[in-house]
Structure formats: C-alpha cells, structure tokens
Amino acid sequence: MRTIRSRTAAAATAALLAGLSLSACQSDSDAASGTPSGARPEAGATASGEAGGTGKAQGEGSGTGPGASGGQSKDAGKAGGTGSKQGTADGSSAACTGANTKAVITKVPRPINHLLLTITNTGSRSCHAYSAPLLRFDDEQSATRIMEDSQPQSVVTLAPGRSAYASILLSGEGGGDSGGRTAQRLAVHFAPRSGSGSAGTPLELTLPAGTHKDNNAAVTYWQGSASDALTF
C-alpha cells in the first residue's frame, strides 16, 4: 500500500514538474517574440492587417494617380497658358498704320466743305485706330486741328477687312478767307497708343480735284461708321 502511494506521489510530482517546465518554455518564447502571453494575434487577423497595409499602399498609389493626373492637368494649363500667350501674340492688336491699312478720301455732298477719309485693315490681324488721323495738307508744317467734341467712347478696333472713318472739315464758318487755298496732296499719319508722336508708316493721298481748304480746317477722331464721322 505504501509502495502504491509512493508511486502515485512520484507521478504527481513528475506531472507538476513537467507542467512548470512547459509554462517556463512558453514564457521564454513570449519574451523572445515580444508578445505577451494571451495577446498573440491569430493568423487570420495578421493577414487582414497585412492586407490593410497593402490596401493603404494601394490607396496612396491611387492618390498618386489622380495627383499625377492633376499634375498633367496643371501642365496642360501651362500649355494652355502658353497657347494663350501665343494667341495673344498672334491675335494682339497693334496700331493701325500705313503698313497694315489702305486709305481712300472722297468728297461728300453733305455736309458741305467736307471730305470723308476711310481706312481699311489690309493685315491679317486686328489693329487699333487710335485717336484721330494726323493730317498735313501739301507742305504744311503743323497737323490739322482735331475736333475734340468728336471723341468716341472707345478706341475703334479694326478686324481684318474692316474700316474706320474720319471726316475733314475744309473751311470754317463765316465766309472769311483765312489762308484759303487749293490743296493737292494729303499726308495721313497715325497716332500711337500713347498719343505722343506718330506710329508706323504714313499714307500719301491725292486729294479730289478742286479741294479748297483754309486755316480753320479740322478733322474728327476715328469713328466706327461713316455716318458717325459725318455728323461733325
């Protein structure tokens, strides 16, 4: 009986020692891995976390994609800006001059003592008819007076093929002869945007036969229509 109890006690002791040894090994393994016992994630959870990490990377990649697309749009905008600059360069408006216009001068029945000066844009892009034509009859040293009350609300811009108009009053009222004479030629100079001096090449015109003018002659600002020009 004592022998059986001794064997039973010995077996219990051996089992206890084995359990303690197994616990110690597991603790050592947890300590080595840095994961507390009972907090170790399951294999499925780890895979999900890795998938989540990959998903984030893919998300960043997708974000980069639109970002790259946005960069291209930005570049396209720059290209558009360049295009816009080219459009401005190609379609910008310079001053109308003798180099990009032709001129015709005609005698009109009404109002009396008036000529109508017409310029037409012969260029490939628009030009601005700034201020008024700067006129010199024959060998006159000073430009013809400008009628200030004829100034339009805005500068007349001529697309290719379009015209601007100015009327020329040849003599003043009163019937007095203030240096009256017959003129044969007319030099048409063009004003620049600054309004100072003249721009580009002038035009030389032959006046209608019998054109008589005096020192009171005057010219209007450029107008968008002949009827507007001839109201002064």
Image (spheres, grey):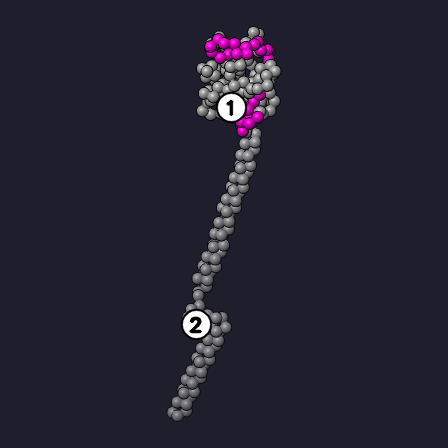
Q: CA distance from mark 2 to mark 1?
A: 94 Å
In front: 209, or 144? Answer: 144
Above or below for 123 versus 63: above
Residue 103 % position (x, y): 56, 16
Residue range in magenta is 171-197
**Residue linked to disc 1:** 131
**Percent coordinates x, y for residue 151 in the rendering:** 47, 22
- Amino acid tagged 1: Ser
Asked if the stretch drawn in magenta spans residue 81, the answer is no
Query: Magenta: predominant secondary structure element?
Result: loop
Question: As drawn, which residue projects farthest toward the top?
Answer: 210
Residue reaching furthest to the bottom: 2
Q: Quadrant of residue 23?
A: bottom left
Question: Looking at numbered disc 2 in the image, what kind of residue is underneath it?
Answer: Ser
Nearer to me, 170 or 44: 170
Magenta span has 193?
Answer: yes
Residue 124 seen in render: no
Seen at 52% across and 46% down, the residue is 68
- For residue 37, the mark is 2
Please, is residue 182 above or below residue 48 in the view? above
**Residue 89: percent from the left, percent from the top?**
56, 31
